[in-house]
Amino acid sequence: MQHRTAARLGRPVSVIGLGTWQLGADWGDVSEADARAILTASVEAGVDFFDTADVYGDGRSESFIGDFLADHPDLDVFVATKLGRRLPQEPENYSMANFRSWTDRSRANLRRDTLDLVQLHCPPTAVIESDRVFDDLDTLVAEGAIARYGVSVEEAGQALTAIARPGVASVQIILNAFRLKPLDEVLPAAMDAGVAIIARVPLASGLLSGRYTKDTVFAPDDHRTYNRHGEAFDVGETFSGIDFELGVEAAVEFSELADSQGLTPAVAALAWLAQLPGVTTVIPGARSVRQAQSNASAGSVPKLTPEFTEQIRDLYDRRIRASVHDRW
């Protein structure tokens, strides 16, 4: 497993991490035994970065991680969590009192006195522009409740605003072969500032695995069913905002590109992201041990060719750009 760091993050982390939204049961049910098996398989494969949030299963995901790490005190795993979605996404709710309440809850769930990284969870632009919000986060750092903070964003413009703030250690953003806009300005700005980039939704909600057809049906409690048109949260979080049928067609082409590299589509998609200059870690989710192991293997794929990147850009420009590039 390769590792990478960024100046403001202050430590190296595995280029393939583990996103644990799935463990909160928003992708269909995952049992406690399965969750523990996924965490175990990930660390055994070299993963040492877990990403979670206080609202994933209303703390379920955080608690699974906290229990797992308590049972394995010798593991050096960096845990990033998020806050800000326990109340409506209104600027007045991002208060010092709420920050203290939310971080205290996450500290209890994760069984940590000091949280490694706390990220604002896709807040409104006005929150990212608020000096007071970041002064409050600086206070939490000074008090020892959190070690560092970052921002998870929906839009490239929000990412650039966050990167410009001197205390921001990381920016988490949707980045995958079907969402290339962050390559234009966000990654260069992050590298210049020493800000870590955490690439989320790296498989476009599974599209880039190449496993789906236009007839694929997802469970009712899977966000790929109930948020396909943005009914519950930003539609960009589901299939990267791409029409499902269009995504399936484009994924067939991507699968052919991956095959030319001797890789499965999912491993090719993750390895390509992990090798992009400026990306610190990539956080695919997993619902099985096999998925966790396969995802982690992308962190040791030899250097991919420049031609592969050119082919991805061509596919994006032909099939995807018009529907997503100007939206996020």
Image: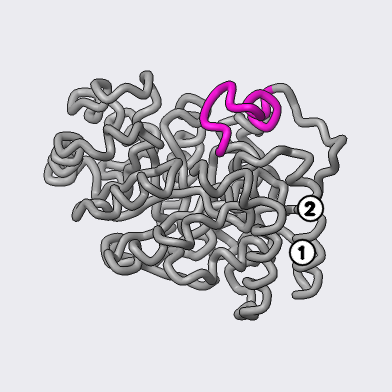
Q: Nearer the viewer, mark 1 or mark 2?
A: 2
Tell me if residue 213 is in the magenta stretch: no
Q: Amino acid at mark 1?
A: Thr
The quadrant holding residue 53 is top left
Kindly identify the residue that appears in the image at 76 percent across and 44 percent down.
246
Residue 123: % across, % down: 36, 33
Kindly identify the residue that appears in the image at 60 percent across and 63 percent down.
45
Residue 84's disc is none
Kindly identify the residue that appears in the image at 36 percent across and 49 percent down.
159
Q: Is residue 308 left or right of residue 200?
A: right
Q: Amino acid at mark 2?
A: Gly
Tell me if residue 225 is in the magenta stretch: yes
Q: Point out the stretch of residues depicted in magenta.
A: 221-236
Which color scheme does this rendered protein use?
Answer: one colour
Q: Is residue 277 above or below residue 109?
A: below
In front: 143, or 110?
143
Disc 1 vs disc 2: Cβ atoms closer than 8 Å? yes
Which element is circle 1 on?
loop
Residue 28: % across, % down: 68, 30
Crowd rating for badge 2 (residues with CA inside 10 Å; few <14, some 14–19, many 20+): many
In front: 325, or 26?
325
In front: 316, or 258?
316
> To which residue does mark 1 refer?
264
> To which residue does mark 2 refer?
210
Q: Mark 1 or 2 closer to N-term?
A: 2
Crowd rating for badge 1 (residues with CA inside 10 Å; few <14, some 14–19, many 20+): some
Kindly identify the residue that appears in the image at 56 percent across and 38 percent down.
237
Which element is circle 2 on?
loop
Give how far apart the Cα atoms at labels 1 and 2 are. 9 Å
